[in-house]
Every structure is written in C-alpha cells, then in structure tokens.
Amino acid sequence: MSELAEEILRSRKYAQVDRAVVERICAATVPKFAKRKDVIKAVKKELHIIHESFLQDECHAKAVAILETHPRVDKDIALQLMALHASTKERISQATEIYAFISRYVTDENCVVDIGCGFNPFALPFFTKQPKDYAAFDINTATVQTLNKFFELGGMLYEARLCDAVAQTPGVQGDVLFMFKLFPLLERQEKGRAFGLLRAMEWKTAIVSFPLKSASGKEKGMEAFYTAQFEGGLPSEFAIIERVKFANEMFYVVGKQL
C-alpha cells in the first residue's frame, strides 16, 4: 500500500491529497484488479471524482496571491476566492441569499465545524455573524495551508486541519455542523458512512447540502434521488427543521429529537 500510495502521490495532481486517503483507496482497490497499472489508474480515477475535479487550475497559488494582496477579505474578494473551487463557485450567483440563510443558524457564540470544507470558509464575509470558533476539515494539505493563511491574515482564531472523513471522526464538539455536498462523496466511498458521521459528531444543528446539477450543469434527477436518499435514510433520532432549495444546491437543516 505504501509503495502504491507513494507512486500516486508523486503525481502533480494528487501530491497534496492526505496520504491516509490515498492509502485507504489503494487498499480498497487492490483486490479488484490483477495488474498494478490498473490499480493505479482506478485509484487516480477515484481521487479525481471525489477531490481533484473540484479544484480549478492553480487554485491554491491563485488564492494565496489574492490573500497576500488583500489580507482583509471583503465580499468582493471572497467571491474571487470562491470562484477558484468548483463547489463554492456554484454558489456565487446566490451567495448573499445562501449565506443569509445559513447565518440564521450561526451566532457569534457558536463553534462551527465544517467537514469537507473545500473553499467554503472563504465565504465568511457573507455571514451576518462571525462564529466564535470555526474548525474546517479537508483532505488536501494545500487547502488546509491556504485556509490557515486566510485565518491568520484576517486575525481570525480559526483553524483548518487534515481529515479523512471516511475513516476518521473529528474529535471536535461544535454547535453547528456543516456537511456541504459531502454526503454523496462519503456514500460513494463507504455506504452508510454519511449518516454514521452525522451520528458520531457532536453538534446541536447540522446543515447538510446536496448538489442539484452535475459538473456540466445538467439536471439528472439529482433532486429526487438525493431527497429520497436523505429523507428516507435519516435516522429516527434526527428531525428535519427546514429544507431550502437554491439554483444549484439543496440544503437541509437538521436537529436532534428530544
């Protein structure tokens, strides 16, 4: 596993992916193929689907350059940063509305835990209240480093960390849990893990989102599929507080049953 992971990590596209993720996917892929080259091809394909396909060209270098020029990020700069990542880029046209909705559940006394965060923390200027704490988790070392630079330059006492959410449950107790477009990626890798993570994390309110369009911008019945998957599979100890649909993304606000 170590040698396979090392070879994949030498690839420029995947060099910044958490080694633990690469080794886990290698271990799951090896039994499926007889030839080493086929294993490597399949692992790279999986890494592309769950991670690399979201990253715009040189997104981390571009983000750092923007931050060094504009260390205090306002809404206009935030949009430039969000445009560098496919997931947050989809929110740009409705950023004000989306984050106003999210902000209804975030106070300045809250700890926010953002799993599979990508570039979502760059949207903080759109929050109506800045949370007391913000713990962001991602599988890309460059993303973690870039976000920590953003936090540091902005004088924010927040932190980004590496985490393979398929195999690890962050040991952070939060008030508000963000799982934006993460459910499909977790379920792809390990069936049942998305709800398992929701159960394992400490939180008071969870905001979970699903994409409504493919990467190419096409609607492929995703709303109906994800609605059935989430609402049909939601464990009985949780309750849906609110469901809101925007152009490209559907959000659920979830609470715990008393």
Image: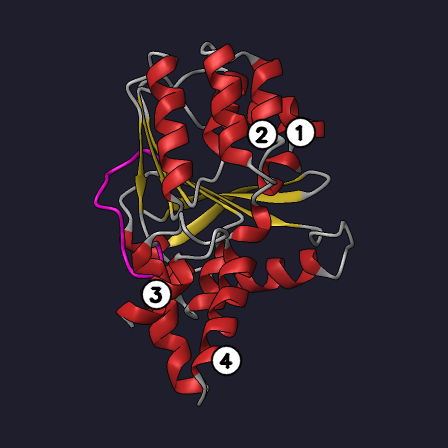
Apparent side of residue 87 relative to residue 47 in the rendered image (left or right): right
Q: CA distance from mark 1 to mark 4?
A: 38 Å
Neighbourhood count class around disc 3 (C-alpha, 10 Å): few under 14, some 14–19, many 20 upward: many
Q: Which residue is mark 4?
A: 38
Classify the position of the N terminus by image quarter: bottom left
Residue 125: x and y in percent read 51, 16
The residue beneath circle 2 is 82
Kindly state the secondary structure of the residue where label 3 is placed. helix
For discs 3 and 2, the disc positioned in front in the rendered view: 3
Q: Secondary structure at mark 4?
A: helix
Crowd class of label 2 (few under 14; some 14 to 19; many from 20; radius 10 Å)? many
Residue where numbered disc 1 is placed: 92
Calculate the distance from the C-alpha at mark 2 to the C-alpha at mark 4. Answer: 35 Å
Q: Secondary structure at mark 2?
A: helix
Asked if residue 47 is positioned above or below residue 216 in the image, the reply reads below
- Report the predominant secondary structure element of the magenta stretch: loop
Residue that appears at 29% across and 35% down: 174
**Nearest to N terminus: mark 3 or mark 1:** 3
What residue is drawn where x is 56% and y is 37%?
Answer: 58
Other-residue count near label 4 (Cα within 10 Å), few / some / many at <14 / 14–19 / ≥20: some
Q: Is residue 187 above or below residue 88?
A: below
The single residue placed furthest to the bottom in the displayed view is 34
**How far, Cα to Cα, is label 3 from label 1?**
35 Å
Mark 4: amino acid? Asp
Where is mark 3, residue-wise? 5
Magenta residues span 165-176
